């Protein structure tokens, strides 16, 4: 069975595999791949395709849909069989299968009444893929009410997925926003951007002081859907949760710098460090840089790592800001006594060399680092290699002659065939040592 040739497969071959579907995993996945890529429309393979849904409920949906579109007389029996299956994976597939098949509303309605939550969820999610919804407003409202009155919280939380398609105003929005279940309130907030502007403001006014942190966090994540961003930003910046405040600072980003002034004095480092990700130069110099400079000199290595992460973030937007404000900090961390700090700083430096057009200006600073501890030289080997590659310097060649064997081993370990010019090959050939690891690296490179 392992030697089946799927390149010259025919329908009879597929039928022979029915007995091993699910038993031979590799063949099962190859069969799924074959069906998805070749999309056969022969009705003979329909039982195989429906069986494969048990293994992966999205695996053959398009194939089944395609067959049913070409053979509409098979729709009723096939969908009824899937919806009566004891395997929820098969029932889950029905809402997607019938999207482009006409006159299948009754099957979708049945999916909404399934006793398994994930099947109901698939029915709800399928609504967004219809060009014209199969239900009227009143029918959608009946579905939403049935979901809202369900015994399980999970299914009640699916109401907003239907509510967003109901054009008429309903009492459900206010009922859910005042619900005792924070999960229901959260599910509503996650869909806030789909509602009318009036409804959005209703939800923000009602839930901006919600007792559940996750609800307020969700409101901050969706705050761009409002036209009066600043008003609610001010509310969330004074939230009792540092997580809400820090996310709000991140959302503000380079806008409304007047809102950021007060964050400098926030008691939480989690909140203040978000200011370090701002990449507008005037704000950074006025607000962000003083925060770094105000940190105690003995701050923990974890804080230094976090600062380096913000430098890495800024580098993606404004390398000139790094040049103006952050080079001294970066180079200080390159010689930090803690390996984790040096290693992350080295990674940031490598990215900086690669991205910044002005990186040649770093050469003198890098030459000074060659005189630092051998531990620093080991950490920065990748950055030196990047600099050589971009600017044609000879840092790697110098490091291959380093007096410390661990530095030479590290350099050898990061070299590849593309790095070996004649001069480097000659240096490697002339290396003498008794170290086992160094010998292995030399042999590897000389065998290219």
Image: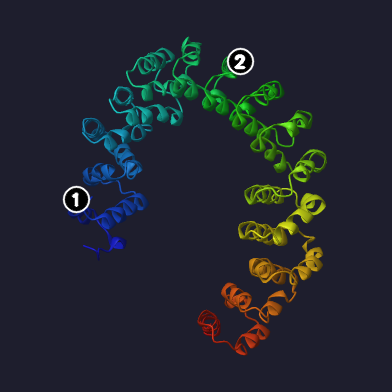
Tag 1 secondary structure:
helix
Would residue 321 be found to the left or right of residue 202 on screen? right
Which numbered mark, 2 or 1, is in the foreground of this view? 2
In terms of depth relative to the viewer, which is nearer, 191 or 103? 191
Can you give x and y, in whole percent of width and height, for residue 232 in the image? Answer: 67, 22
Regarding mark 2 in the picture, which secondary structure is present there? helix
Circle 1: is it few (<14), some (14-19), or many (20+) Cα within 10 Å? some
Q: Residue 435 carries which label?
A: none
Q: Which of 254 and 334 is in front in this view?
A: 334
Seen in the picture, residue 431 relative to 314 is either above or below; the reply is below
Residue most toward the front?
298
Q: Which mark is residue 18?
A: 1
Identify whether 286 is placed above or below 191: below
| Left or right of residue 351, residue 321 in this image | right
| Residue 341 x, y percent position in the rendering | 64, 56
Q: In this view, does 15 lie above or below 167?
A: below
So how many labels did they put on this image? 2
Name the spot of residue 87 as percent of width and height, x first: 24, 36
Query: Which mark is first along the chain, 1 or 2?
Result: 1
Q: In this view, does 67 lie to the left or right of 236?
A: left
Residue 381 horizontal/vertical position (percent): 65, 69
Who is closer to the viewer here, 166 or 373?
A: 373
> What's the colour scheme?
rainbow
Real-space CA distance between mark 2 and mark 1, rounded to the nearest whole angstrom: 57 Å
- Residue 205 marker: 2
Q: Relative to the observer, which residue lies in front, 40 or 432?
A: 432
The quadrant of the rendering that contains the N terminus is bottom left
């Amino acid at each position: 069975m392992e030697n089946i040739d799927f390149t010259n497969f025919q329908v009879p071959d597929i039928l022979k595999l029915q007995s091993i579907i699910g038993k031979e995993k590799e063949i099962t996945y190859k069969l799924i791949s074959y069906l998805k890529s070749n999309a056969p429309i022969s009705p003979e393979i329909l039982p195989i395709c429906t069986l494969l849904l048990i293994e992966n409920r999205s695996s053959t949906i398009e194939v089944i849909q395609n067959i049913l579109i070409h053979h509409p007389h098979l729709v009723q029996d096939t969908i009824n069989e899937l919806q009566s299956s004891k395997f929820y994976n098969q029932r889950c597939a029905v809402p997607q299968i019938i999207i482009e098949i006409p006159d299948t509303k009754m099957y979708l309605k049945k999916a909404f009444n399934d006793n398994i939550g994930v099947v109901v969820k698939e029915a709800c999610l399928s609504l967004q893929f219809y060009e014209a919804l199969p239900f009227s407003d009143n029918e959608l409202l009946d579905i939403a009410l049935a979901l809202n009155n369900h015994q399980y919280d999970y299914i009640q939380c699916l109401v907003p997925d239907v509510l967003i398609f109901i054009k008429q105003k309903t009492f459900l929005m206010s009922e859910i926003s005042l619900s005792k279940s924070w999960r229901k309130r959260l599910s509503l907030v996650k869909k806030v951007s789909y509602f009318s502007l009036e409804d959005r403001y209703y939800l923000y006014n009602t839930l901006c002081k919600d007792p559940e942190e996750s609800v307020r966090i969700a409101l901050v994540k969706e705050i761009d859907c409002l036209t009066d961003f600043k008003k609610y930003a001010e509310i969330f910046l004074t939230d009792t949760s540092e997580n809400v405040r820090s996310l709000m600072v991140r959302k503000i980003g380079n806008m409304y710098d007047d809102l950021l002034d007060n964050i400098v004095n926030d008691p939480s480092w989690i909140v203040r460090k978000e200011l370090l990700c701002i990449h507008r130069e005037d704000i950074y110099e006025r607000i962000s840089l003083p925060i770094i400079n105000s940190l105690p000199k003995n701050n923990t290595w974890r804080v230094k790592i976090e600062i380096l992460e913000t430098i890495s973030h800024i580098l993606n937007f404004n390398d000139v800001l790094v040049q103006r404000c952050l080079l001294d900090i970066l180079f200080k961390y390159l010689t930090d006594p803690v390996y984790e700090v040096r290693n992350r700083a080295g990674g940031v430096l490598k990215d900086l060399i690669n991205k910044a057009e002005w990186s040649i200006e770093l050469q003198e600073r890098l030459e000074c680092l060659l005189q630092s501890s051998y531990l620093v030289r080991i950490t920065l080997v990748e950055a030196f290699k990047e600099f050589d590659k971009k600017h044609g310097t000879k840092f790697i060649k110098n490091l291959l002659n380093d007096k410390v064997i661990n530095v030479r081993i590290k350099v050898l370990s990061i070299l590849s065939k593309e790095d070996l010019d004649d001069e480097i090959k000659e240096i490697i050939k002339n290396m003498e040592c008794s170290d086992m690891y160094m010998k292995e690296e030399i042999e590897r490179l000389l065998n290219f």
